[in-house]
Amino acid sequence: MHILKRPDAEVQALAQALIEAKQQIGLCSVCFHLSAEPICEICRAPSRDSATVCVVAESRDVIAIEKTREYKGKYHVLGGLISPMDGIGPDQLHISPLIRRVSKNNTQEVILAITPSVEGETTTLYVGQLLKPFTKVTRIAFGLPMGGDLEYADEVTLARALEGRRELD
């Protein structure tokens, strides 16, 4: 509704900006994150820990993790999740480049940061098994959000919260 109320010139300028962004943004040749350059800013940064690779499904996951300012390693974007129901198999994802990357580089740890859905679990198990011969493979912990009540949490969330527990400092 907001766009419909704007002058035609503004709407055309917005449309042109979207077209230009679509044409200029591609995928990083190393990690497959969105980038206007052949190699993204994160992959080019010498300050990032190249021995640790965080595997995510989509570029929006990279953005979410970067907002925490806690992770200092590199990334690998799969480009989706294995979903046989949707006709998406491992060959449609960026799994082979990940295996090559980890096997050739001095990768000490791969962190699987994939959504805990049916497709996410399938992808996590598949990718994890392929990577185990080359490096340490971990996954992020899942659990209760801040302010969440135990009585309203589902069984899977509670189970993940218990699995991901750690000792108090």
Image: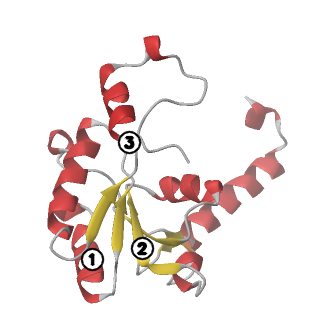
Residue placed under numbered mark 1 in the picture: 97
Of 71 and 12, the residue lying toward us? 71
Q: Which mark is residue 150?
A: none
- Residue positioned 61% across, 62% down in the render: 19
> Residue 86 at x, y = what percent?
21, 42
Residue placed under numbered mark 2 in the picture: 52
When the figure is inspected, residue 75 is found, relative to residue 6, above or below; the finding is below
Q: Residues within 10 Å of mark 1 (few under 14, many from 20)?
A: some
Distance from label 3 to label 2 (Cα)?
Answer: 20 Å
Give the amino acid at mark 2: Thr
* 6 sits to left or right of 83: right
- Residue positioned 36% across, 33% down in the render: 162
Q: Which SS class for mark 2?
A: strand
Q: Earlier in the sequence, mark 3 or mark 2?
A: 2
Count of labels in the image: 3
Q: Are marks 2 and 1 in contact (CB under 8 Å)?
A: no
In the image, which is nearer the foreground, mark 2 or mark 1?
2
